Amino acid sequence: MTITSEEFTRAMARVPAPVTVATTVDASGRRWGFTGSSFSSLSLTPPLVLICLGKTASTHEAFTTAESFMINILAEGQADIARRFAVSGADRFAAGDTLPMELGLPGIPEAVARVTCSLHRVVDGGDHSVLIGRVVAAHVGEDDPLVYCDRSFQRPAAVAETVRGAAVW
């Protein structure tokens, strides 16, 4: 039995995921960023996280060769930032809502959390690369996180209703 890519995509869309913006700076000082929802903690000792990045993404080389990167976990009111960092070819930093934060990396001050990492390893993940970061700093904010489920941005409290089949908003 083989699952089709459409069936797999449909099933995975039902899994609530955090909405993050990963950022880095390359050796020439150019800022790079992308929106990602395949983000998770991996290990406590040592402290590791992972985020997945498509191999065809314009940001792929910058992140797979970076010394460090930051994961900004977005707050429920930051869907516009997530959308902007998901658009290919746009100046994702033009809005001015990122500032130099931990290790001088572009960070989003109002993010629910920021996790700053040194690049620990890049692992092959099919059509994606799995970026494993060793956490060197973390900042925790106070807002509720933004969640992505059923191909839309949602509040955490609304996810349970959506997963049961009744979209709240």
Image: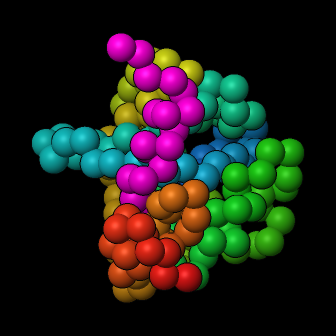
Q: Is residue 39 visible?
A: yes
When asked about the image quadrant of residue 123, the answer is top left
Q: Is residue 50 above or below residue 4?
A: below
Q: Position of residue 5 (x, y in %)?
A: 54, 27
Which part of the image, by quadrant, shows the C terminus?
bottom right
Q: Residue at x 35, y 68 (%)?
A: 164
Magenta residues (range): 1-18
Q: Position of residue 146 (x, y in %)?
A: 48, 72
Q: Nearer the viewer, residue 127 or 166?
A: 166
Q: Residue furthest bottom?
A: 142
Q: Is residue 19 above or below residue 36?
A: below
| Coloration mode | rainbow
Left/right placement of residue 55 relative to residue 90 reads left
Q: Is residue 22 above or below residue 139?
A: above
Q: Residue at x 39, y 59 (%)?
A: 16
Q: Residue furthest top?
A: 1
